[in-house]
Every structure is written in structure tokens, then in C-alpha cells.
């Protein structure tokens, strides 16, 4: 899966990508707008108080608007 940039595909399509990641339980590499990056598994995408959040296995949930990009990640591949 190539890097999916929210600004390029739009919010609704980006949420679809995150929801698909939650369904397949594979790690994703996430880049936040503030510069932080991490790899984790999306467990759910929820809406609360008119804001969408990606819920991760090991990290705090993140507002979708704060996510700049995501890509599928194989944690076993050499870097």
C-alpha cells in the first residue's frame, strides 16, 4: 500500500482507509501533522462530539484531522 495522504484523498476516503486497516488488523505507519510518527494497529474509527478518531492498539486515540498520512507496514521487513 502506498502512502495515503489525507490532504490528497480527502477526509472521507482517508477514514475509509483507516476503517479498512481496522478490519484487516495489520500495522500501519502513521505520520501526524505535528511531525510525530509511529507504527501501530488501528482497532477502530469512532465519532465523538462531531470529531472522528482513530483508535490504536498501543497508542492513544488520535483525531483523524491530526493524521497527515498512513501506510500499511510490515513490522517484520528489514529496514
Image (cartoon, rainbow, N blue to C red):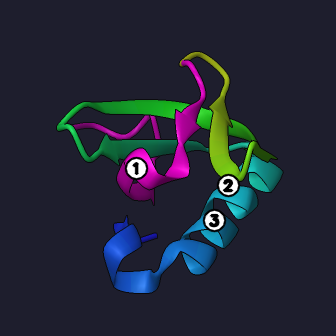
Residue at position x 53%, y 73% from top? 11
Q: Seen from this angle, which residue lies furthest bottom?
A: 9
First of labels 1, 3 by sequence position: 3
Instruction: Find out whether residue 9 is within the magenta segment.
Output: no
Instruction: Give me the C-alpha separation between circle 3 and circle 2.
Output: 10 Å
Image position, residue 32 (x, y; %): 31, 42
Q: Seen from this angle, which residue lies furthest front?
A: 49
Q: Secondary structure at mark 3?
A: helix
Image position, residue 9 (x, y; %): 44, 83
The quarter in which the C terminus is drawn is top left
Left of 77 or right of it: where is 64? right
Within-10-Å neighbours for mark 1: few <14, some 14–19, many 20+ = many
Residue at position x 45%, y 47% from top? 73
**Residue 67, numbered circle:** 1
Residue corresponding to mark 2: 21
**Residue 45, numbered circle:** none
Within-10-Å neighbours for mark 3: few <14, some 14–19, many 20+ = many
Residue corresponding to mark 3: 15
Q: Give the answer, above or below, for where 60 lies relative to 68.
A: above
Instruction: Give me the C-alpha separation between circle 2 and circle 1.
Output: 14 Å
Left of 27 or right of it: where is 75? left
Q: How many marks?
A: 3
Q: Which residues are magenta?
A: 60-79
Q: Secondary structure at mark 2?
A: helix
Amino acid at each position: 500500500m502506498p502512502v495515503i495522504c489525507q490532504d490528497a484523498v480527502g477526509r472521507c476516503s482517508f477514514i475509509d482507509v483507516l476503517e479498512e486497516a481496522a478490519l484487516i488488523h495489520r500495522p500501519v505507519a502513521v505520520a501526524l501533522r505535528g511531525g510525530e510518527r509511529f507504527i501501530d494497529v488501528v482497532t477502530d474509527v469512532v465519532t465523538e462530539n462531531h470529531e472522528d478518531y482513530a483508535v490504536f492498539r498501543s497508542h492513544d486515540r488520535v483525531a483523524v484531522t491530526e493524521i497527515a498520512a498512513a501506510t500499511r507496514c510490515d513490522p517484520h521487513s528489514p529496514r
